[in-house]
Amino acid sequence: MGIIKRNFANNILSSGTFDATKLTGDIPTGNLSANAPAFDDNKIVNDLSTLGLRVHTQENLNASNTNSQSVDVFQDDTGIDTETNTNRNASEYVSSESTSFSTPSFITSDQSSVYSLSYANFSIDGAYPLNASAALGTGNSHATSGQTWFFTPNAQSVSSDMRIVMDLGSGNSKIFTGARQIQEQINNCGTWVWEASNDGSNYTALSSNFTWGASTTVEETWSNDTAYRYIRVKGVSGSTSSSPWQYGFQFQTKTETLTVNATGNFTGTTITAPSSVSSMGAVITYQDQSGTNALNTDIVLQLSADGGSNYTTATLTALPDFSSGIKMAKVNDLAIGTPGTQLKYKISFANQSSGSKEARIRGVSLNY
């Protein structure tokens, strides 16, 4: 074999040959594996989970899934299957709170100081103006100039830009479940609808269309669990009449009571994986509304691959905070006791107490 010459100035081999006996045979696999670091994709998976949770949070997205990941930030209830002593709150979290409501009842007392009143494109007899006292006061069944609870509209066509708005004021709201329109005698004043809002711009229809004046008392009731600041009656079609005295409006409301249960749990909807799954992972976001909730004690995560028939309990470990006041935890590569394609998670609460220890789950990203 030749001799290798090296050009030291340029740090290269310029000529010569190697000893062939030194180059024969394969490099032992053990030598390769011993020096190559094992690949760990957990950091990538956790980052993708965090990204998915962040995008869903910022864009107010409903629950969604791919072939390897599902994400839910509780924008609505579509990603939740069962709830036991838990509740998804409209503020987009799940906790061990339970909600109960009082029996709805009509408020018949003078409400003129509770609401401020305004109206648009509604023509009123100037001698009997429309204000809070006229629409929400305590007049009797025969209006006279000495009484407060009455008003009279002028005859005009009813259109969708006609409305009478009652405002409870900033920071105030009620859960409206019905409304009465009361007048002196039966006389059709057109078709109207009751609506409610919290910003004074975007309104939600509460009632079906009804005929104002179809009887002396027109009572509309509806199902509603949301508290609103504003309630209004809006025109639809027809025309008003100036004949009957209008005695005003009364509202049916109910109150909500929240109870923090010591224990509870909820499950996600079942996700069908493209192939059998034997290990799973998850990233959750949560909030210590009160106290400090211990992972794996006060908040427990379990994963299933057979539709919830069998669960494997995860050991959650903390991640850096998701955002201010919102914590994160993860589990990677949890070996599932019963492999399958019907994937599900279950989160349980323990040791919860109002004002002392309250956990709120803000999001779940399931990896498979």
Image (cartoon, rainbow, N blue to C red):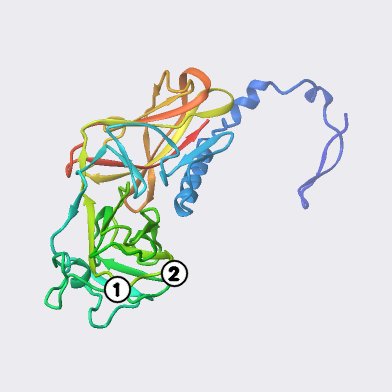
Furthest toward the bottom, the residue is: 126
**Residue drawn at (31%, 39%), measured in percent from left and top?**
87
- Give the quarter of the image for residue 148: bottom left
Where 37 falls versus 44 (above or below)?
Answer: above
Which residue is more in the foreground, 233 or 8?
Answer: 233
Q: Nearer the viewer, residue 56 or 253?
A: 253
Crowd tier of the residue under label 2, counting other residues whose Cα lies within 10 Å: few below 14, some 14–19, many 20 or above:
some
Q: Is residue 338 visible?
A: yes
Give whichever of 173, 315 is nearer the camera. 173
Q: Which of the 4 quarters of the picture holds residue 165?
A: bottom left
The residue that label 1 is drawn on is 118
Residue 348 visible within the image? no
Q: Position of residue 212 (x, y in %)?
A: 34, 62
Q: What residue type is labelled 2?
A: Ser
Q: Is residue 74 left or right of residue 243?
A: right
Q: In this view, does 345 lie above or below 91?
A: above
Classify residue 255 as left or right of residue 312: left
